[in-house]
Image: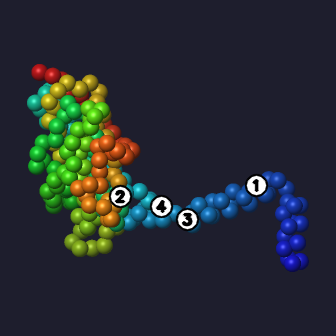
Amino acid sequence: MNTIHMKTIHMNTMKPSSLLALCVASMLALTLSSCGGGGGSDDSFVGAANVSISLQPSEIDSGDRIELSAELSNVHENGIALKFRYPEGLKYVASSAFLLIETKEIDLTPTVNQSSTDNEMYLVFYIPQSSFRRGGKPYEGESGTVVLQLEGIDAISDGLVEVDPDVDDPDQPNATEFSVDTPEFDAQDKAYVTVVAQ
């Protein structure tokens, strides 16, 4: 009882600047201790994956193709739903997608390849974390690259190609996990594309 009383008196007699410093230090300690790992080498990362995309080339004529590359790392232990969104002036080239891990290529087939009512296309791949492991070793956040081709079929002026990785829900079948009506799409990276009609 006396100890609590002494601490209370001490806090009440502290200078405001000292009290502020103590509060900031306490909040920082709580924040750092609450961060969890996301299955990768960066212990503070808690998302589905780190991702960045690039297009080569970014401007084409209709009938030509673009190669899209999405580099992924820190893939969640449940695996990911890798979602792409792009204008209807582009179409996915069938059987063009693969996951590149160092020199190994793993063929990918989209679970979803569908347009929405707002004239945008959605392409979704489900990829397990195990696909990114090297030679059966534990996964340590290493990167891999999803490569696919898109073909220009109609004019696009400064359109967006976007990507959003989500954690794969182990309690839901992949075939019904995604809907274009409620895509829950939060772009993590984007690139601009132009298609010139011929």
What residue is shown at x 80% (from left), y 53% (from top)? 17
Most foreground residue, 116 or 58: 116
Q: Position of residue 166 (x, y in %)?
A: 35, 54
**Upstream in the sequence, badge 1 or badge 3?**
1
Does the rendering let one see residue 192?
Answer: no
Mark 2: give few (<14), some (14-19) or many (20+) Cα within 10 Å: some
- For marks 1 and 3, give the one nearer the viewer: 3
Q: What amino acid is labelled 4 in the image?
A: Ser
Q: Position of residue 172 (x, y in %)?
A: 30, 61
What residue is shown at x 11% (from left), y 21% (from top)? 198
The answer to whether mark 1 and mark 3 are in CB contact below 8 A is no
Quadrant of the image occupied by residue 8:
bottom right
The answer to whether mark 3 and mark 2 are in CB contact below 8 A is no
SS state under label 1: helix
Q: What amino acid is labelled 1 in the image?
A: Leu
Alpha carbon distance from label 3 to label 2: 20 Å
Q: Looking at the image, what colour scheme do you see? A: rainbow
Q: Which residue is mark 4?
A: 44
Is 3 on the left-hand or right-hand side of 134?
right
Quarter placement of the N terminus: bottom right
The answer to whether mark 4 and mark 3 are in CB contact below 8 A is no
Mark 4: give few (<14), some (14-19) or many (20+) Cα within 10 Å: few
**Upstream in the sequence, badge 4 or badge 2?**
4
Q: Which residue is mark 2?
A: 167
- For marks 3 and 2, give the one nearer the viewer: 2
Is 47 on the left-hand or right-hand side of 128?
right
Q: Which residue is mark 3?
A: 34
- For marks 2 and 1, give the one nearer the viewer: 2
Alpha carbon distance from label 4 to label 2: 16 Å
The answer to whether mark 1 and mark 4 are in CB contact below 8 A is no
Q: Which residue is mark 1?
A: 20
